Amino acid sequence: MLAVSPVAAAEYLIWDQYVFGDGGAQVSPVLETNLTYRIVAEEIWYYDNASNLAADAQYYTTNFSNSWYWGDYLPAPDNHSFLQIDGGDVDWGPFSNGDTGHKYSINYTGEGAALTFNITDWVDSTKEGNGCKIRVRIYEPVTVGGYVVEPGLLEAAKLPVVSLMAIALLIAAPLVRYRNRRKT
């Protein structure tokens, strides 16, 4: 199983697709070897659409009254995950309910290959009656000179630039006024 760990780097979106609960796989672009990507999975799919029974990447509910805000939730059976990568289970982390969009995030180190995402119905083991989808996005870190840029550094770099611009305006405005007075 892939482990979940937080990402603190600046990043940009490289892939955004839906993986459908009624079958079919989605294949990502090739992920560069040894580069750490962030994969985000969110939203729900129905393992029993007719009964309004839903699941997300890692958990499912047996309460049909609300498919978005779950009163009960259970992990996928036998420590599986519903959303799989390359046919394998993923540890998507702690439960995320409707107020957080059933959103999960993991780090994944590229291996020079594309990833295949699919939903496996571990509840009733059939694709019949399944519906909806899970949105999957992959983010690539921003690098400068071969180094991953931390978001704090980006913010810190903006501060001196803004400060210098303010100083330049404070100096330039009186000079322009002085110059304009001398011309008249």
Image (cartoon, rainbow, N blue to C red):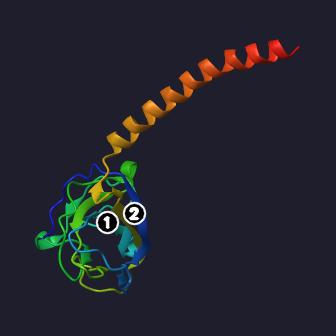
Please state the total of marks drawn on the protein image.
2
Q: Quadrant of residue 152?
A: top left
Q: Is residue 180 left or right of residue 55?
A: right
Q: Marks 2 and 1: CB-CB under 8 Å?
A: yes
N-terminal label among 2 and 1: 2
Q: Which mark is residue 142?
A: none
Whole-percent x and y of residue 92?
22, 62
Whole-percent x and y of residue 41?
34, 64
Residue farthest right in this picture: 184
- Distance CA(mark 2)–CA(mark 1): 6 Å
Whole-percent x and y of residue 51?
39, 72
Element class at badge 1: loop
Question: Which residue was labeled with disc 1?
Answer: 56
Q: Is residue 33 left or right of residue 14?
A: left
Mark 1 crowdedness (10 Å alpha carbons): few <14, some 14-19, many ≥20: many
Q: Quadrant of residue 168?
A: top right
Give the residue type at disc 2: Glu
Question: Which residue was labeled with disc 2?
Answer: 43
Element class at badge 2: loop
Quadrant of the image containing the C terminus: top right
